[in-house]
Amino acid sequence: MNSAAPSPVAPLARLRGITKRFGPVTVLEDVDLDLYPGEVLILAGENGAGKSTLIKILGGVHTDFAGRIEIGGQTARPRSPLEAAALGVRVIFQELSLVPSMTVADNIFLGRPLTRRGGFVDNRRQRAEARALLQRLGIELDPDRTVETLPIARQQLTEIAKALAGEARVIVMDEPTSALNAPEVAHLFELIRQLKARGCCIVYITHKMEELEAIGDRVAVLRDGRLVGVAPAVELPRDRLVHWMVGRELGEQFPHHAATPGAERLRLEGFTVPDPARPDRPRVADVSLSVRAGEIVGLGGLQGSGASDLLWGLFGAAPGGARGRVWLDGEPVTLASPAQAIRRGLALLTSDRKATGLVLPLSIIANTTLADLERLSPGGWRRPAEERRVTEALSRRLALRAASLDLEVETLSGGNQQKVVLAKWLQIRPRLLLLDEPTRGVDVGAKREIYQLLNALTAEGMAILLITSELPELLALADRLVVLHRGRITARLERAQATPETVLAAAMGQQTAPAAASPAASS
């Protein structure tokens, strides 16, 4: 095993011989790791490498493990997240641990409420201290807002504020930027620099190479539950990091994509998605575009651009419905519900797989077949053998890594969960695939597998509408781009025209193409 030179500074925490098994499956084996003050330690590895299990052990979620933890020089074995927090360890999990029906202030002080005489919660003091904390952190949030009314990015900022409210010395962040836009990411990085200056250790999990390079001091890589190596970030070039992670060379990041567009698959004219809360300002306004069989059309835009609302409206799932004209393969259609959309051959992979993509307590088989039960169950009779057969075929195609197809999906890594969502939609044999952040929370190896899958699907004639917040990914995968700003089209770009500068300028509202241009002429 490769390891960085020892630091002369005493570590805040030591992990020695950490081993964890789920039944017969070993997910961590003999992991040693030191966490030093004033550093950002990037914890890297493919999905399923053991990263989340390791931080759950440190954070008091998993208590049945072998090995030893020392915090502040003392042996510790946190038996709950509250005990870990009392020891100075806070974990910001990828799965948000907020109570949706409670306010931002109540969530920030969840588990350690501020009380007055008699043990009653002092709501006024909590609101005041939450407001002061948010202002100190530079996070614009109303402490009286109910969390369930916030978009996912604001919920993530609430989770971050909750973790930073205590006197933590070790702060673990698991994919904290997955729902944040560029300015919010820049602000988070500034907060991390402030925490480093205070002597905190930040354990940071990310699959984004640019984030690793921007804030990482050291990198620790897990593969198949073992610690492969630890090195200073500046001494670990991308190719060696990827080799440590996947155990093989991947070649170029984006496989070659050559579109051979066929007949027009989708056409939208005057497509509008209202905002029930603001009738005067629709989420999507008068959008016209087309997608041909065998091509990927990318939807660019910043958070709030309306791109996701466009996909939800097209899928018949927008809260306020949608209006406008829609054609599929030249036939005018009405898509007023997801059931109608699915019957017409549309599939929507949403940006939040846990909330809207999967039923976490159900098995891989149950999730994979969920959208196609009507066809798989003629006469209303389930056929378990057929469900297993189609799931096995899709799991092989997607290189799904799971000990058994009967496992509950919630036990899988993020990347393998994403593959199950893809399998579910591929099972309905869609004509048009709507993808909203298909590689969010997915490691570099799984990303490449998804890119290869998209190439194979377009080669088979599938049409794809793609949203991704990773601009290099959008530019590499999309044959054409339609950029939105506040629900309106500001640019239509062929691949050769699309650059980071042109896309960002259009995403910020600079009009580079007539918004009313006909799809046949310019999309």
Image: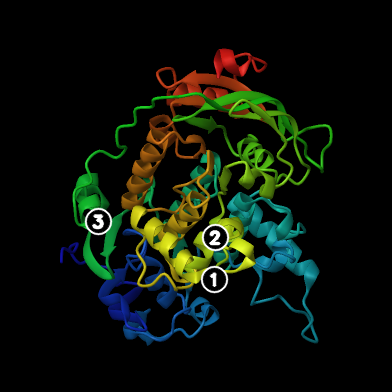
Amino acid tagged 1: Leu
Amino acid tagged 3: Val
Q: Please report the residue visible at 66 percent of the width from the left and 40 percent of the height from the top.
A: 309
Q: Between 480 and 205, which is closer to the camera in this rendering? A: 480
Select label 2 or label 3 by which is in front: 2
In primary-sequence order, the first of circles 2 and 1 is 1
- Position of 107 with respect to 25 (left or right) is right
Rendering quarter of residue 407: bottom left
Please say whether residue 328 is visible from this viewpoint: yes
User: Mark 3 and mark 2 in contact (Cβ < 8 Å)?
Assistant: no
Mark 2 closeness class: few <14, some 14–19, many ≥20 residues within 10 Å = some
Q: Between 63 and 378, which is closer to the camera in this rendering? A: 378
Select label 2 or label 1 by which is in front: 2
Residue that label 1 marks: 362
Reply above or below: 232 against 181. below
Q: CA distance from mark 2 to mark 3?
A: 36 Å
Q: Residue furthest left?
A: 1
In primary-sequence order, the first of circles 2 and 3 is 3
Residue that label 2 marks: 376
- Position of 376 with respect to 198 (left or right) is right
User: Mark 1 and mark 2 in contact (Cβ < 8 Å)?
Assistant: no
Element marked by disc 1: loop
Dividing the image into 4 quarters, which one contains the N terminus? bottom left
Element marked by disc 2: helix
Q: Between 279 and 74, which is closer to the camera in this rendering? A: 279
- Position of 241 with respect to 273 (left or right) is left
Amino acid tagged 2: Leu
Residue that label 3 marks: 246
Mark 1 closeness class: few <14, some 14–19, many ≥20 residues within 10 Å = some
Q: Please report the residue visible at 81 percent of the width from the left and 42 percent of the height from the top.
A: 276
Provide residue 138's location: percent of width, then percent of height.
Answer: 61, 49
Element marked by disc 3: helix
